[in-house]
Amino acid sequence: MRNIFIVAFIFGLGIIFWLKPKKYGYIIPAYIPLGENFDVDFDGIAKFSKGNKVITIVNPNNGPISREENKYYFEKLEDKIKQIQKNGGKVIGYVSTDYGDRDEMEVRKDIDLWKKEWDIDGIFLDEGMGSCGDSCEKLIKKYQDYYEYIGDQIIVTNAGYIDENYEKFLKDGIIMIVFENTYKNFISPDNYLGNLDLQSGKKGVLLHTSPMDIDKKKLKRLYKKYNLDYIYLTSKNWDTISLKLLEDL
């Protein structure tokens, strides 16, 4: 009889664990045009970072700027980054890879600038490998080399679109954006993620042009179903998101 109670207790714990909602990790874009429109809600991001798992992507000029290049905006953004980090948030710097086609030396120059001049927590490799087809092995080596070059920091890679080869691009600690599309396509029954084994690695989805009237229950269910670790939402402008929407999730 005692064994039956033990089995029932363990089974019950398993059910509770399964039914328990999975807590979101958030990736927030802070793409800042230099000039009079330098207006991202950094105060709100810093506040939201307190008590939430948040990675903020900073992108002042489609990549990094140096202090020498633009001291005013460099120091202004530097202060905002410190504000987010002080509240427990992580900040990573934007680097374009042009789906693997950008010159590797140019990619490394951006990485070097972020690491040398900025006190950030990692790198966002945008425009990632996607579906690599016949060039898969070459692309795998290229991105693995980037990971090694970045070193022991947070690395988020935006694959954009993935196929069954995505696991070959993974490395311990890498966060892979495995879906970049609209919220509507994400919740669609035809969503290609349902055809893939997504048990390996840390993963996130980028849902662009996200509406404010998101079906929160459905989103949470799919987040758990696809074993995701981060959600990355953008507004109709692609480069910002309403913090109210994130708070309401």
Image (cartoon, grey):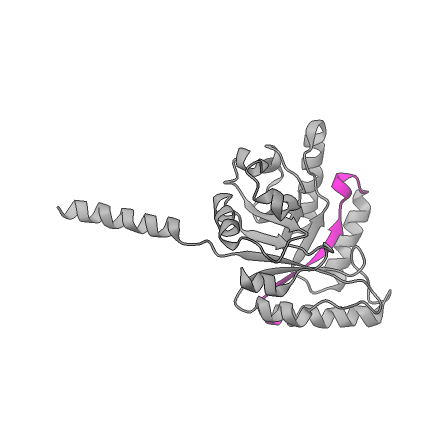
Of 211 and 112, the residue lying toward us: 211
Q: Is residue 32 magenta?
A: no
Instruction: Provide residue 72's location: percent of width, then percent of height.
Output: 83, 72
Instruction: Provide residue 115's location: percent of width, then percent of height.
Output: 72, 59
Of 165 and 144, the residue lying toward us: 165
Q: Give the residues in magenta.
A: 86-102
Residue furthest top as drawn:
134
Of 214 and 130, the residue lying toward us: 214
Look at the image and tell me whether residue 180 can be seen: yes
Residue at x 82%, y 67% (from the top left corner): 67
Residue at x 68%, y 56% (from the top left corner): 235
Tag count: 0
Instruction: Provide residue 185's location: percent of width, then percent of height.
Output: 62, 42
- Judge from the rendering whether residue 218 lies leftward or rightward of residue 239; answer left or right: left
State whether residue 89 is above or below residue 18.
Answer: below
Residue furthest left as drawn:
1
Instruction: Provide residue 242's location: percent of width, then percent of height.
Output: 65, 63
- Judge from the rendering whether residue 23 lies leftward or rightward of residue 80; answer left or right: left
State whether residue 88 is above or below residue 217.
Answer: below
Residue at x 54%, y 38% (from the top left corner): 189
State whether residue 105 is above or below residue 54.
Answer: above
Residue furthest front as drawn:
213
Residue at x 71%, y 26% (from the top left corner): 134
Look at the image and tell me whether residue 196 can be seen: no
State whether residue 149 is above or below residue 167.
Answer: below
